[in-house]
Image (cartoon, helix red, strand yellow):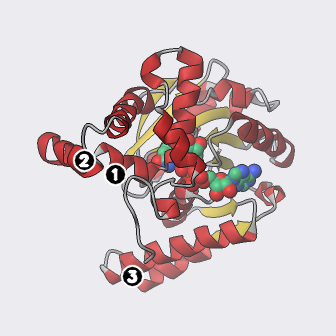
Amino acid sequence: MEIKNVGVVGCGVMGVGITQLCAQSGYNVVVTEVSDELLNKGLKSIDAVLGRLVAKEKISPRDKESTLARIRGTTDLGELSGCDIVIEAATEDMAVKKDIFARLDKVCPRRTILATNTSVLSVADIAAATKRPEQVLGLHFANPVPVMKILEMIVTIATSQGTAEIARKFGESIGKTVVTAKDLPGFISNRISTSYLLNAVRLVQEGIATPEDIDTVFRLGAGHPMGPLQTLDLIGIDTVYRGASALYDELKDPQYAPPPLMKRMVALGWLGRKTGKGFYEYPKE
Ligand SMILES: NC(=O)c1ccc[n+]([C@@H]2O[C@H](COP(=O)([O-])OP(=O)(O)OC[C@H]3O[C@@H](n4cnc5c(N)ncnc54)[C@H](O)[C@@H]3O)[C@@H](O)[C@H]2O)c1
């Protein structure tokens, strides 16, 4: 099957990047959100990112226009009916994802591959909400999507080889190096990185060091482009909190138990860059 039309569910941190990258790679993209307000916020940020690429002469003004012309936003999931592959990048919540997949299963033609960008949730559980589990898999992008070269492909015990082959080709067509992982909690990256991120929060919680000093240790001492608390702010404190909670639920390993400080930050809406405050503050541009 040749993929031409891509659907993206959710136009938040990841949906924005996936939409931009797929459109820049020549695919027609329909992206859905729950409200016009969130949709417009996401589409505006794609416009702004492309504008910055034009200013830096990385793409031409014409590239920007043609990319934007390939993107259509909607609040109606039914408009994904013409898509060959749909990538779900909605909130990291099993109930939300199951509801979306059950609806996608009704809306999308039989050929459509359904992928989830979940960070840690069971892809098989999500696939079980559909009548096509052999055509469901995980496509776990890294943030920022247009920059990071890796794509983790998660195959469940039900995913067909044909589905995995098409998805791998698709991932390569948008410039990614595709690695495969089994459908077990956290796959590759989050199984390893979650405990690192949570340990950094524990240091802040215990007052052992400031976020700045912890991040400086990893930037200057380990060559990381960002420290763990800057990374948490980039990903979203709520997303890491939900992911860690899901890992802890499945593995019962205390290294994944989210520190109480995170719960309080989520309650206050201190979610990182996306809300302007997390471990650091981000003045509005
Ligand atoms: N943030 C990261 O760095 C990162 C990295 C890899 C994977 N992920 C995963 O990607 C997914 C999305 O994460 P995010 O950081 O973009 O979250 P986010 O909170 O920034 O965005 C999620 C968006 O999904 C929307 N949404 C919720 N229900 C919806 C529905 N029924 N239809 C359409 N839109 C809906 C929300 O309104 C929200 O705007 C999660 O599963 C997360 O675990 C995140």
- Residue at image position (71%, 31%) is 126
Mark sitting earlier along the chain (2/3): 3
Query: Which residue is disc 1 drawn over?
Result: 230
Q: Is residue 156 above or below residue 80?
A: above
Q: Are marks 1 and 2 in contact (CB under 8 Å)?
A: yes
| Left or right for 225, reference 95 | left
- At label 3, counting other C-alpha atoms closer than 10 Å, the crowd grade (few under 14, some 14-19, many 20 or more) is some
In this rendered view, identify the residue nearer to me: 205 or 50: 205
Distance between the Cα atoms at labels 1 and 2? Answer: 7 Å
Query: Which residue is disc 2 drawn over?
Result: 215
Distance between the Cα atoms at labels 1 and 3? Answer: 31 Å
Quadrant where the C terminus sits is bottom left
Residue 196's x, y, as percent?
34, 32
Identify residue type, mark 3: Ser
Q: Is residue 184 above or below residue 31?
A: above
Location of residue 55 by image quarter: bottom left
* Residue lying farthest to the front in this orientation: 207
Quadrant where the N terminus sits is top right
Q: Which secondary structure lies at badge 1?
A: helix
Distance between the Cα atoms at labels 2 and 3? Answer: 36 Å
Would residue 7 be seen by someone viewing this image from the given angle?
Answer: no
Mark sitting earlier along the chain (1/3): 3
In this rendered view, identify the residue nearer to me: 45 or 135: 45
Query: Which residue is disc 3 drawn over?
Result: 60
- At label 2, counting other C-alpha atoms closer than 10 Å, the crowd grade (few under 14, some 14-19, many 20 or more) is many
Residue 185's x, y, as percent?
53, 23
Residue 265's x, y, as percent?
51, 47
Identify residue type, mark 2: Asp
Mark sitting earlier along the chain (1/2): 2
